[in-house]
Every structure is written in C-alpha cells, then in structure tokens.
Amino acid sequence: MFNIDIAVVNLGKRIQEARLLRNITQDYLAEKCNVTPKHISAIERGSSPGSVTLLLNICNVLGITPNSLFVDSFSEDKKTKDCIIPIDKHEVLVKYSKLTNSNQKFINTAINHCYDEQTRR
C-alpha cells in the first residue's frame, strides 16, 4: 500500500544521497534553487515534500532525473534502473561520503579485496 509519509522521507533521502555523491552543500543547492538552506534541510529530512518546480530545479542542479527521486515509491515491478542504491543502504552511503579521502580509499580497497576473494571461489 502506498504511504505518502514514507514516500516523502525516501524522496528526501534520495536528494541528500545525490547531493552528497556530488560533494554539493545544502547551501550551494539552496542558492542555485533560490530557496533557503533550511528549506533544503526540511526536504532532506522528509518534513517537507517541496514543490514540483523546486524538485525539478533540484534535479537540474544535481544532474539527476525525477524518476531517481521517486523510485522507492513504486512497487518492485515498476522500479526503474536509475536507482543508485537500495534505500536501506542510504545510511551507509551518507557515512561513507563524510569520510576523509584516505579513509574512502581504504574502504574501496577493502571492498575490492572482499569482492575478489568472493569471486575466486
């Protein structure tokens, strides 16, 4: 069953995810979209859905499609391929994006090592 509250929270997570992956601050995104950083923060927290115009501006600044923001709102058979990661991995991505470059390199090396070990079997 469709739950609008969950859809709004997931929308905010997807915006935050895309913003962090591009190393864009809330201040910069807000400036480019002609809103306050507080408004962007409210959208990312899921306490405000934002207007259609604002969401399209956000997509334009972040270089993403609106589909990628709403992919979690549809049933499995309607999901598109522009989903970056499953929503349940969102917190991991947020934490990863906040690591220093050297720590990110370390994590990348560890992941590559684990993957190589797994695929050799």
Image (cartoon, helix red, strand yellow):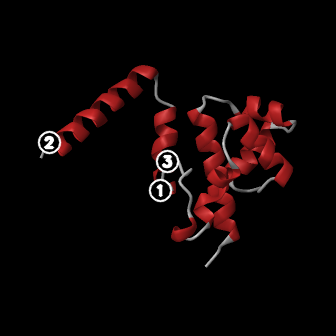
Height in image: 58 above or below 22?
below
Instruction: Tell me the number on the disc at residue 120.
Output: 2
Residue 15, can we see it? Answer: yes
- Foreground tag (1 vs 2): 2
Pointer 1 residue: 88
Instruction: Tell me the number on the disc at residue 31.
Output: none
Secondary structure, mark 2, is helix
Q: Quadrant of the N terminus?
A: bottom right
User: What is the CA distance from the residue labelled 3 to the residue labelled 2?
Assistant: 29 Å
Give amino acid for label 1: Asp
Q: Please identify the residue farthest to the top as the structure is shown.
A: 102
Q: Are marks 3 and 1 in contact (CB under 8 Å)?
A: no
Give amino acid for label 3: Glu
User: What is the CA distance from the residue labelled 1 to the residue labelled 2?
Assistant: 28 Å
Tell me where residue 114 sits by quadrant: top left
| Residue at the image point whose x is 19% and y is 44% from the top | 119
Of the numbered discs 3 and 2, the one sitting upstream in the chain is 3
